[in-house]
Image: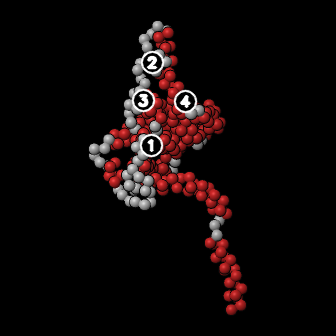
């Protein structure tokens, strides 16, 4: 018995060492995990630490105070108006793009089939041009005596409407900027709908509305949800549209954060604002996902 125990001892020790070692997949993913940790977690930790530092100081990790958050939640602080504008703009942008992008994505899948995802990448090409350049192009289009106004006057018509530096044109700029972020996931989501399933339902006498409600929409919902969440997260942090097209007639929360970090040199306050916005986005996203019946959306009854 003792000889058997001694013979099994090396094998047992080898099994223990193997159990303690990372799997092949984990070792391959380790560089990516380290990169994400440095590129994502480290800045978030720094922002969180700065949010508890003494106001208008750089005493990060050397002081702890809730004064920054107290000033944000002060009823006399107007930062909540900026926050409300940002949330409103983001929600309206998502709603507008959902209505605009769905027919485009449906048409791309109907016309190009499996190549629809590749064709939708063409809508991403404007992202290779600086956002500021594109927005200033719209300024030249809408400004008085600009492209629109000058063309109408040249045709003998009244000048163009005064739309620049208004909330409406800010919303237009956001919808224009974030269209690719809604369209691409939505196109991929609609590509998941099997055409054979749609044809079978049509052969069995199902109407067009019934097919859309019971087959196409549930199967495409994962892509639609990803597009909506991605667009909302990006839109709530938009700054350039309110600055360039809106002329800062509306102050959004991202502009308040920028001012705190730059002109005011109050990094703790800017960090506290960033933490509040991040927590709000995370809570809203998790709440929305928890309220959705993903089994029903994916067609699992």
Residue carrying label 4: 133
Q: Which of marks 1 and 3 is nearer the N terminus?
A: 3
Q: How far apart are marks 1 and 3 (CA)?
A: 19 Å
- Left or right: residue 283 versus residue 222 is left
Please give the residue where the numbered disc 3 appears in the rendered image. Answer: 247
Of the image marks 2 and 1, the number of the one nearer the N terminus:
2
Residue at mark 4 to residue at mark 1: CA–CA distance: 23 Å
For the residue pair 200 and 153, the one nearer the viewer reads as 153
Q: Tell me if residue 121 can be seen.
A: yes
Tell me residue 135's x, y (percent): 51, 29
Residue at the image point whose x is 51% and y is 53% from the top: 43
- Between the C-alphas of marks 4 and 3, the distance is 15 Å
First of labels 4, 3 by sequence position: 4
Q: Residues within 10 Å of mark 1 (few under 14, many from 20)?
A: few
Disc 1 designates what residue? 262
Above or below for 213 versus 6? above
Residue nearest the viewer, comparing 214 with 8: 8
Q: Is residue 155 above or below residue 70?
A: above
Category of crowding for the residue at label 2, using alpha-carbon neighbours closer than 10 angstroms: few (below 14), some (14–19), many (at least 20)? some
Q: Is residue 176 left or right of residue 55?
A: right
Q: Which of marks 1 and 3 is in front?
A: 1
Residue at (51, 41) in percent of width and height: 227
Residue indicated by mark 2:
144
Above or below, 57 against 15 in this view is above
Q: Do the residues labelled 2 and 1 touch (CB within 8 Å)?
A: no
Which is more N-terminal, label 3 or label 2? 2
Identify the secondary structure beneath mark 4: helix
Assign a secondary structure to mark 1.
loop
């Amino acid at each position: 018995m003792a000889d058997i125990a001694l013979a099994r001892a090396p094998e047992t020790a080898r099994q223990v060492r193997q159990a303690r070692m990372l799997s092949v997949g984990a070792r391959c993913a380790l560089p990516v995990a380290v990169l994400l940790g440095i590129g994502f977690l480290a800045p978030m930790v720094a922002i969180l630490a700065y949010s508890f530092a003494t106001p208008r100081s750089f005493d990060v990790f050397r002081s702890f105070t809730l004064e920054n958050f107290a000033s944000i939640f002060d009823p006399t602080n107007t930062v909540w108006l900026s926050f409300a504008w940002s949330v409103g703009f983001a929600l309206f942008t998502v709603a507008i793009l959902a209505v605009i992008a769905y027919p485009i994505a449906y048409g791309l899948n109907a016309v190009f089939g499996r190549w629809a995802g590749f064709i939708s990448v063409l809508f991403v090409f404007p992202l290779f041009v600086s956002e500021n350049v594109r927005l200033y192009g719209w300024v030249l289009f809408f400004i008085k005596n600009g492209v629109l106004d000058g063309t109408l006057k040249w045709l003998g018509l009244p000048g163009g409407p005064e739309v620049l530096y208004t909330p409406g044109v800010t919303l237009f700029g956001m919808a224009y900027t974030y269209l690719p972020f809604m369209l691409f996931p939505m196109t991929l989501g609609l590509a998941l709908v099997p055409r054979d399933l749609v044809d079978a339902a049509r052969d069995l006498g199902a109407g067009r509305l019934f097919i859309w409600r019971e087959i196409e929409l549930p199967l495409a919902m994962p892509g639609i949800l990803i597009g909506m969440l991605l667009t909302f997260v990006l839109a709530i942090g938009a700054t350039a549209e309110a600055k360039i097209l809106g002329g800062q007639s509306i102050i959004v929360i991202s502009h308040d954060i920028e001012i705190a970090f730059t002109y005011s040199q109050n990094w703790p306050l800017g960090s506290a604002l960033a933490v509040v916005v991040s927590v709000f986005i995370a809570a809203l996203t998790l709440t929305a996902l928890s309220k959705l019946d993903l089994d029903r959306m994916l067609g699992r009854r």
